Structures are given as structure tokens and as C-alpha cells.
Image (cartoon, grey):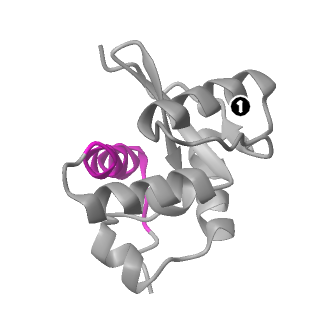
Amino acid sequence: MKKDKINLTKLTENMNVFDSYLFSENVQEKEFALNLLTRGHDFIYRIVNGQYRFYPSRFIGYADNTLENHTLDKGDGRRTNARLNKIVGEKSTRSLHLGAIYNTYVNKVKPNNKKKYYKKKFWNYDFGGLD
């Protein structure tokens, strides 16, 4: 079973780990992150160098998560969402604005993607930009 303790510091660390996979030269790491990004339902976002980046709750919602840990135990998005609701102070919701930005982001990191994603939900929380 995955560790349950998550806080803002661990959340930010998991965002950095997720980014390292998404922008990796390693095909396995990149595909792992792209799969989570496109199949996820609920996302936290932050702005890095003026660009939105999105993070699936199912990955970032567990402390010290890695590709290896996640592969052994994928966890349950409902549990991570409840934890993130507590940290953020609200539930994730659908947003046409963030949905459009999310679609643009997915097409940027996965250039041959033709699919559009409309049923995604987002937490509107300022994690601070990394400019």
C-alpha cells in the first residue's frame, strides 16, 4: 500500500518528478507520464516559465511517488482526490478555460495527439509560478 502522508512539500516534489518523466529522453519514463497525463481525470496545475503544466492527482497525490512505486501500486484516484481537496481547500471542478489550456498543453508534449479532452477537472490553486 502506498504511503498516505502528503503535504505541499511532497506534492511539489512529485510535480518535479512527474516533469522529469514527461520531459525525459527515456522512452519508458516519457510514455509513463504521457499515459497518466492523457488518461487522468483530475489535475493540479502550476505555471512554470510562463507556461501551464498539469499534474494527474493519481500520481502526485501519494508521497514520494515514482514510476516504480506507481507501477507496483497504482493507487486509487478517489483517495488522492480527497487528500488534495484537503490541501487545496476545495474540490476539483470542470473549467472550459483550463480544459482548453490543458488540450493545448497535451498537444505540445504529445505532438501527434488528435484527441481532445473535455471531461477533465482541475483544482484552481496557486502553487506559485516557477519563472
Q: Given the image, on which type of amino acid does mark 1 rest?
A: Gly
Q: Residue 103 location, x and y as percent? A: 63, 32
Query: Can residue 61 be spotted in the picture?
Result: no
Q: Residue furthest left?
A: 25
Q: Tell me the quarter of the image containing the C terminus.
A: top left
Classify residue 28 by image quadrant. bottom left
4 left or right, relative to 116: left
Query: Is residue 94 on the magenta stretch?
Result: no
Relative to 88, residue 60 above or below: below
Q: Tell me the quarter of the image containing the N terminus.
A: bottom left
Identity of the residue drawn at 46% across and 41% down: 110
Q: Residues within 10 Å of mark 1 (few under 14, many from 20)?
A: some
Q: Which residue is mark 1?
A: 99
7 left or right, relative to 124: left
Q: Which residues are magenta?
A: 5-23
Relative to 50, residue 55 above or below: below
Query: Can residue 11 be spotted in the picture?
Result: yes
Q: Identify the secondary structure beneath mark 1.
A: helix
Identity of the residue drawn at 51% across and 59% down: 36
Q: Which residue is nearer to you in this view: 108 or 72?
A: 108
Relative to 46, residue 109 above or below: below
101 left or right, relative to 109: right
Classify residue 15 by image quadrant. top left
